[in-house]
Image (tube, coloured by chain):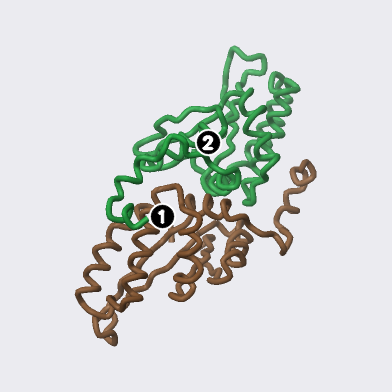
Chain colours: A brown, B green
Amino acid sequence: MESEMENPQRLHVQPQSERLEAQWVVGFVDGEGCFFVGINPHPEMTSGFQVLPEFTVVQHQRDIQLLHALKQFFGCGVVRRNHGERMAYRVRSLEHLNQKIVPFFEQHPLRSKKKIDFLKFRRILLMMQDRKHLELDGIEAIRDIAAKMNTGCER
Amino acid sequence: MESEMENPQRLHVQPQSERLEAQWVVGFVDGEGCFFVGINPHPEMTSGFQVLPEFTVVQHQRDIQLLHALKQFFGCGVVRRNHGERMAYRVRSLEHLNQKIVPFFEQHPLRSKKKIDFLKFRRILLMMQDRKHLELDGIEAIRDIAAKMNTGCER
């Protein structure tokens, strides 16, 4: 490790085969993750609104390799610039959220209060599977849940 | 899990026996931890300065139970209010830093660029073991290392 100290640049090149451990992912997401549900006006939808759940982890670009490692770990999502020097790992596909992200955090529970956001996020995804978001009643119920999420996470 | 969704207050009471896993701690510290070395004027020291290394994890008070879990995990440190609604887990004892914090992160390496801060932190602790911080030359060398640490962490 001392040689890394002397030459920090070496740390910038992480081996491609670096694999994350599940509990590391849980700890990192407890710190840096965000479960968000956007609700945007959308005239072409019957309900008049589009519901857009997303799972996001934002980092300074110096740690972009961690975002790529998360993408590899979950086997879905994209790494894009968020704004300025901030990069984001983002999963928006309903299929990937339902089949990869949600099952992972069911099997490996978060330890911070983000767990409450996750449970609300999962509840909204289940409502969408029941097509509730296509009716105005459902939109209002989803909006009520989403309004109580994400106290202080970056996305 | 659905019952926690219905009654989020239940999550506020975590069982006392909750134990963290090492990789969760690494992931959480990659996101939220800080290795900091303060250098303050101190007329009573031969060198004129006091060197104060500290390991800190800051969280909103809603997640104070995680800070207590970290204290239990490392078997050292204190949990105190940082400012406003922010709480901090903090280890300042040189003995605890040298015997508990540093060996843990040697055995369980960080994955983010905070690893570079950790290596500088460890180097300064080693210099202090060699009593370098008691001479002005040593203070200047420590100051040079410390000045390049902690790009964007909260303490």
Q: Quadrant of the N terminus of chain A?
A: top right
* Side of A150 where B36 appears, left or right: right
On the image, the x and y values in percent for residue B75 come to 56, 28
Whether A129 is drawn above or below A111: the answer is below
On the image, the x and y values in percent for residue B23 come to 60, 47
* Side of B57 where B61 appears, left or right: left
Q: Nearer the viewer, residue A125 or B17?
A: B17
Q: Nearer the viewer, residue A140 or A106?
A: A106
Residue at image position (45%, 47%) is: A111
* Side of A144 where B144 appears, left or right: right
Label 1 sits on residue: A153
Looking at the rendered structure, the kind of residue marked 1 is Cys
Q: Which mark identifies residue B37?
A: none
Whether A109 is drawn above or below A102: the answer is above
The quarter holding residue A73 reads: bottom right
Number of marks? 2
The quarter holding residue B136 reads: top right
Contact (CB < 8 A) between labels 2 and 1? no
Label 2 sits on residue: B56
Numbered disc 2: secondary structure? strand
